[in-house]
Amino acid sequence: MKIDNIQDKIIEEFAQFSDKVHRIPYFRKLIQIGNDLEPIPKEELDKEHEVKTSKSNIWIKARLMNNRVFFTAESDNSISKGLVGLLLRVFSGNSPRDIINTHLYFLNEINMYERLNQDWVDDLLAIIQKIKLLSTKLQVLEITRSDMADAV
């Protein structure tokens, strides 16, 4: 599965930051990942694409092409942007079904939950929830379109 291969690569990338001494480089790496995101144009930063969090303003857009979901994202906070960027590396380009059914084991393997305070963990969980919700909506739309085409 493609998603598991990406998770394994991320685990390898973060292996050099395995102990608490590497806290600053760990977060620099996360910020770098966020800086690589394709941004959402400012005029599209609206309530529909907003992720409900307490710490940051985050927006995620999804589009379906050839039964694959592609995401773009934006945030006003570099750590949140890194978190969303890391998750989009895993999810973007996969089918809605694969995204919905993914077990995100890499987060434990790179000690993400240990490194983040509770507010950041809450943001991370909200981002995951938004990605899976968008994927579910796109899957339902695709099924509905397919059923309507078959009925004609």
Image (cartoon, grey):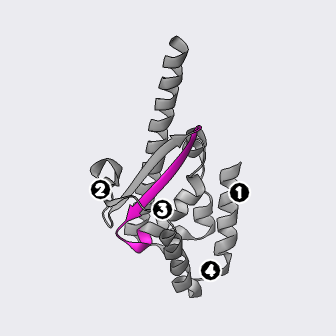
Task: Return the mark for residue 43.
Answer: 2
Looking at the image, which residue is at 51% across and 12% down? 151
Q: Position of residue 23 (x, y in %)?
A: 53, 83
* Crowdedness near tag 4: few (<14), some (14–19) or many (≥20) residues, C-alpha within 10 Å: some
Q: CA distance from mark 2 to mark 3?
A: 15 Å
Which numbered disc, 1 or 4, marks the residue closer to the eye?
1
N-terminal-most mark, 2 or 4? 4
* Crowdedness near tag 3: few (<14), some (14–19) or many (≥20) residues, C-alpha within 10 Å: few
Which numbered disc, 4 or 3, marks the residue closer to the eye?
3
Report the amino acid beneath label 4. Phe
Task: Return the mark for residue 17.
Answer: 4
N-terminal-most mark, 1 or 4? 1
Task: Return the mark for residue 38.
Answer: 3
N-terminal-most mark, 2 or 1? 1
Q: CA distance from mark 2 to mark 1?
A: 35 Å
Is the residue 79 above or below the residue 45 in the image?
Answer: below
Q: CA distance from mark 1 to mark 4?
A: 20 Å
Q: Position of residue 74 (x, y in %)?
A: 40, 62
Q: What segment is highlighted magenta in the picture? A: 66-80
Report the amino acid beneath label 3. Glu
Q: Which residue is mark 1?
A: 5
